[in-house]
Image: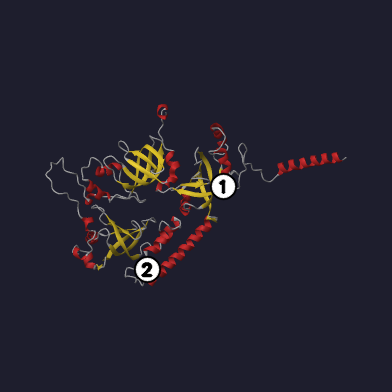
């Protein structure tokens, strides 16, 4: 009898389990290959699978063959996932802003690609942030960088929702603005007849500078409250326009590099000729265009009130009759043309000297100089017969500027001492040595000799007779892969 009762109980349990399975409101979730996954509440098809689950299938330690991986990948490609990871790096250039590397174990394991409407969200995150994100599995790599996710979105940043974080940042910006007004008022800076506002460079930089966490769209909204207002600030002349068409642009340093661009009217040409690099000046002007980078903004309708300790009257400012002897002279060499001793030479032997007045270094809105390698080589290459000292002097005008060039990969590798670098050909041989941060090793090592790449970098060392130009802070924006023949692959 006892056995009959146990048998009936087993049958009833089985029936109950099967009916529960069939009529369950939610589909069961499986975490391994070969099964279909439930669709989430959104219109996109989400799969309930973690990064670790897919890493076990497709990662470095997977026991599957390449063909098995390829077959399994078809079950996941095009599906959406919701994961959590650490921001490992962000694209640095205008054309690269939408690429973000995410770390799950070591290095960057996932590359997120964002659409244009997510630009403000991307600007809110920084390296080291813990984020919850979503995206569509689109590409499988056989490296430490394993997956590429498109249509990416960020849901939380450091356990705070994006909307909550936006509100918090705007609140902090408001408090910062109020604080800067209080600080500037305490300095008793009087408003001029033009309506100067009592706000310092530091006050605006906290809100609109590159380290501000406020989204760009919100910055532009807030900037409307400042555009057209007059300020009175003090800074150091960092550079001047070098050509006839560029004389009215002067870069001012408040912290590091060029933070403010002054734009002078035609009647101020005299005073612009007088000031030189390194001068500490007090200036007034009207807030014009917001850049929101290290270069914060441009100032128009500029007037110089002091150079060093010398007060400049309005009459002096509008004429050429300012006495050079009454102004600082420690940097006068910056305005002296480079002249070599006169030596009897034939015309073919004479060095081609390029003076500063002949140089025009135009910059794009995203901070790159409009200059090709070929144009730069006309000045610093072997064909130019200027002396090394002349080239060294001119190089200071280009050093630490950013360029965007396109060339052919000649070599790339990573060394313990030399670091991560790439040799690039433009004309013949290796014309550029491009150095990268170590976190970009996957991006660099996925290229091969013969690929054509568009890249950016900071000019560090000028070309020598044998050595190439050296660029740091390298970044690859685009790769056009070359198709190798069987002999070349060997």
Q: Residue furthest left?
A: 344
Determine the residue located farthest toward the right in the rendered image.
1
Left or right: residue 265 compared with residue 435: left
Disc 1 marks which residue?
A: 82
Residue 250 lies, in percent from the top left, at 29, 57
Q: Quadrant of the C terminus?
A: top left
Cα–Cα span, label 2 and label 1:
47 Å
Which residue is painted at 46% across and 51% down in the image? Answer: 119
Q: Position of residue 444 (x, y in %)?
A: 42, 41
Query: In the rendered image, which quarter is residue 321 located in?
Result: bottom left
Q: Residues within 10 Å of mark 2 (few under 14, many from 20)?
A: many
Residue at the (37%, 63%) spot, across then down: 201
Query: Which residue was labeled with disc 2?
Result: 198
- Taking depth in this image into account, of 27 and 417 the one nearest to the observer is 417
How many marks can you see? 2
Q: Position of residue 356 (x, y in %)?
A: 23, 51
Is 359 in front, or is 327? 327
């Amino acid at each position: 009898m006892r056995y009959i009762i146990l048998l009936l109980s087993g049958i009833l349990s089985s029936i109950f389990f099967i009916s529960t399975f069939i009529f369950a409101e939610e589909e069961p979730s499986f975490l391994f290959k070969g099964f279909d996954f439930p669709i989430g509440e959104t219109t996109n098809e989400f799969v309930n699978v973690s990064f670790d689950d897919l890493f076990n299938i497709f990662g470095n330690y997977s026991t599957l063959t390449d063909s098995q991986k390829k077959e399994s990948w078809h079950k996941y490609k095009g599906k959406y996932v919701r994961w959590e990871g650490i921001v490992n790096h962000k694209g640095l250039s205008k054309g690269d802003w939408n690429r973000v590397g995410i770390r799950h174990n070591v290095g960057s394991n996932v590359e997120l690609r964002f659409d244009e409407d997510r630009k403000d969200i991307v600007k809110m995150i920084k390296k080291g942030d813990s984020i919850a994100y979503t995206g569509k599995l689109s590409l499988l790599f056989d490296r430490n960088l394993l997956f590429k996710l498109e249509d990416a979105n960020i849901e939380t940043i450091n356990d705070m929702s994006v909307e909550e974080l936006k509100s918090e940042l705007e609140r902090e910006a408001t408090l910062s603005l109020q604080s800067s007004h209080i600080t500037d008022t305490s300095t008793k800076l009087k408003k001029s007849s033009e309506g100067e506002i009592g706000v310092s460079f530091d006050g605006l930089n906290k809100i609109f500078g590159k380290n501000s966490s406020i989204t760009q769209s919100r910055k532009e909204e807030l900037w409307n409250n400042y555009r057209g207002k007059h300020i009175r600030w003090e800074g150091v002349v960092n550079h001047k326009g070098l050509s006839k068409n560029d004389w009215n642009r002067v870069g001012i340093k408040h912290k590091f590099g060029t933070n403010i661009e002054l734009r002078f009217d035609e009647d101020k040409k005299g005073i612009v000729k007088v000031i030189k690099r390194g001068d500490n000046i007090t200036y007034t002007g009207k807030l014009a265009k917001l850049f929101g980078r290290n270069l914060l903004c441009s100032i128009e309708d500029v007037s110089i009130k002091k150079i060093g300790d010398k007060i400049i009257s309005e009459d002096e400012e509008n004429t050429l009759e300012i006495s050079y002897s009454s102004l600082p002279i420690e940097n006068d060499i910056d305005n002296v043309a480079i002249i070599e001793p006169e030596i009897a030479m034939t015309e073919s032997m004479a060095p081609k000297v390029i003076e500063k007045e002949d140089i025009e270094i135009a910059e794009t809105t995203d901070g790159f100089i409009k200059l090709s390698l070929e144009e730069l080589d006309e000045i610093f290459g072997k064909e130019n017969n200027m002396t090394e000292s002349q080239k060294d002097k001119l190089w200071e005008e280009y050093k630490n500027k950013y360029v965007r060039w396109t060339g052919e990969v000649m070599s790339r590798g990573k060394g313990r001492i030399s670091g991560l670098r790439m040799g690039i050909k433009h004309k013949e041989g290796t014309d550029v040595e491009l150095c990268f941060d170590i976190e970009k090793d996957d991006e660099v090592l996925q290229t091969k000799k013969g690929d054509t790449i568009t890249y950016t970098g900071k000019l560090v060392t000028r070309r020598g007779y044998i050595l190439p130009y050296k660029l740091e802070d390298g970044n690859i924006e685009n790769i056009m892969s070359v198709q190798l023949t069987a002999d070349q692959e060997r």
